[in-house]
Amino acid sequence: MGASLLSAPAFAQVDFTGEWNPLYHEDGPERLPGPELGDYTELPINDAARLRADSYDADRISVVPEYQCRPHGADYSMRGLGNLRIWREFDTATQQLIAFHTHLLAWDSERTIYMDGRPHPPEYADHTWQGFSTGVWEGNMLTITTTHLKTNYLRRNGVPRSDKATLTEHWMRHGDYLTVVTVIDDPVFLTEPLVRSDNWFLDPGQGIGVFGCEYEPEVPRPEGTVPHHLPGTNPFLTEFANWYGLPPFAVRGGAETLYPEYRSKIKPYNPPAQCERYCTCTNLFNCNVTSK
Amino acid sequence: MKRLLPFLIFAAGRVFFAPAAGHAQQNFDNVVEHLLPVQGSVYMMVGAGGNITVQVGKDGVLLVDTQYAPLAPKIMAAIRTLSPMPIRYIVDTHFHGDHTGGNGALAKLGGAGAMPRIIANDHVLNRMTAPPAAGQTAVPEADWPNDEYFTASKDFFFNNEAVVVYHMPAAHTDGDSIVFFRRSDVISTGDIFTPETYPGIDLARGGSIQGEIAALNRILELTVPAKYQEGGTYVIPGHGRLCEEADVVEYRDMVTIVRDRIQDLIGKGRNLEQVRAARPTLDYDTQYGAIPAGATSGSPAADRFVDAVYKSLGGK
């Protein structure tokens, strides 16, 4: 008995297993209905990412069938819309923890986070939406490194994230709450790491439905059509700044705009006299442009 | 090496427009040939030069492209970890030497006494048998295709699956082929698709931007993704990592958008210098042009691509 206890593997300091419900008190309008076009605030992007986003035409999703069922990447799926399930996989012979698995409502996305020390695949291997993830314990915090991501978006208004990016996550559990801090390093589109956080609460009774998606041409189009705006022709880029009374340069993103001292440069700043958009936004049902 | 400098352009670890013959004094001592299982009976081999597609089975070994002649022993050793069978077929995706240089050497090492069929579009044979330009060496006869086709496609059955070779006219060159392994559901594209660099459009050898885009769209017609735009048909590019349909979509979009921008600038009467200065590839240079995220200067690779698109669209 004693020997058996002594040989028990010290796997997880914290168990994340369970059903988790997302909290949207951070960045609700971006995460629920979706971001405004031209809103690049809080993103340390470079000129390449900025022009790519300026050229983005949302028609791409409806006109190009290959985009219709494209899921969030691992870096965005944890902050996108949907509930989360986490479960563990053990080696039945050794009772060593092999992996955590996650399932998200959105696009039925599933991810494996290997805990058995296996290496990441070679650079020339295939990339996937969820990438290849490995985790290590840092005290009670699980730190996850994800590589081999497909090109996708940092924000759903066309701000890109490349397939060269590395995602680092820190999972922390405090009772019935789970906090996930994500750090994205992208040598292609970011000049500094992008740090974001999301929170969840334990909801054992939740059910997760099937997302499902079937791509279907909805608009007649010439072969090979790729909707986009030529440089300098996108008419929607000034809307966001105008709605919130911000000078246009202040919503263009960039590392400088992440720091508090940048506030002194946002002049003129003429916010609306009272809240006009997304005045309430804490869940799927109360978050819309006209919510008061 | 000196004599090849005008023809060999190194960018992002790969070679553009490698001449049909000659690897000169390039040192291959440290090259390791890596094999990656793809799907069904198909593997991807990564070494120096273009990716090699390897299909193995009861009938023998089929290769798509062959890298360089000095690498043939290493390539053959890697193949022998998969199959003891002879090489029966080689398919050349185009005539550039980083894809065809090993034809003869591999045929000799792996043919088991019988010369493999070396399949290619007839433009490939024409390019490889043409008198060499000044300073270049002739392509050895052993590297020449011996089973060329001039039709829109050529198909045959090998290792229990249909293998379809499609001609992609006037894309990277005038003699491009893609190879579709129908049961394995894998497509080998040659340099029409190089996911880490801009496409090299070899205008002097019949390439064109419109043909390049048409070829990418043709590949997308053939690919079918599995659930949620992932898996399904796998795509082995000419250079770079293993891909799927979504990766080809990203690339097709980039090439199409850059084409549209340059077409717009030509329509406004801009000359090549002005088009370059407008930086129509700015948002893609850190991804395909081999410059870092914080760089503000242009990319030589981008300039080559812009030049090729401009000239291909009739810019003066």
Image (tube, coloured by chain):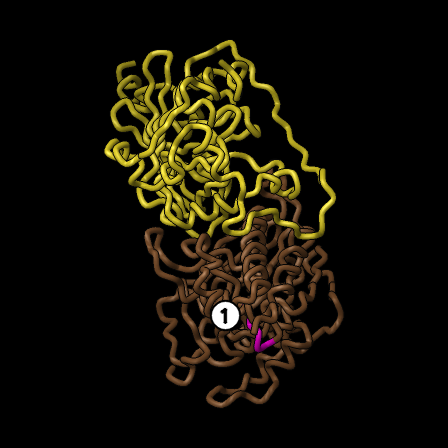
Chain colours: A yellow, B brown
Confirm whether the magenta stretch covers residue B203. Answer: yes
Residue B185 image position (x, y, % from top left): 65, 50
Frontmost residue, B188 versus B133: B133
Q: Residues within 10 Å of mark 1 (few under 14, many from 20)?
A: some
Q: Position of residue B249 (x, y in %)?
A: 58, 49
Tell me if residue A254 can be seen.
Answer: yes
Q: Is residue B205 above or below residue A84?
A: below
Seen at 65% across and 66% down, the residue is: B177
Q: Which residues are magenta?
A: B201-205
**Residue at the (47%, 50%) spot, across then down:** A125
Q: Nearer the viewer, residue A261 or B148?
A: A261
- Name the residue rendered at 59%, 84% in the picture: B141
Q: Is residue B300 above or below residue A50?
A: below
Specify the farthest residue to the right.
Answer: B151
| Amino acid at the residue labelled 1 | Leu
Residue at image location 60% in from the left, 65% down from the top:
B209
According to the picture, the residue beneath numbered tag 1 turns out to be B272
- Quarter occupied by residue A274: top left
The percent coordinates of residue B93 (x first, y second) are: 60, 68
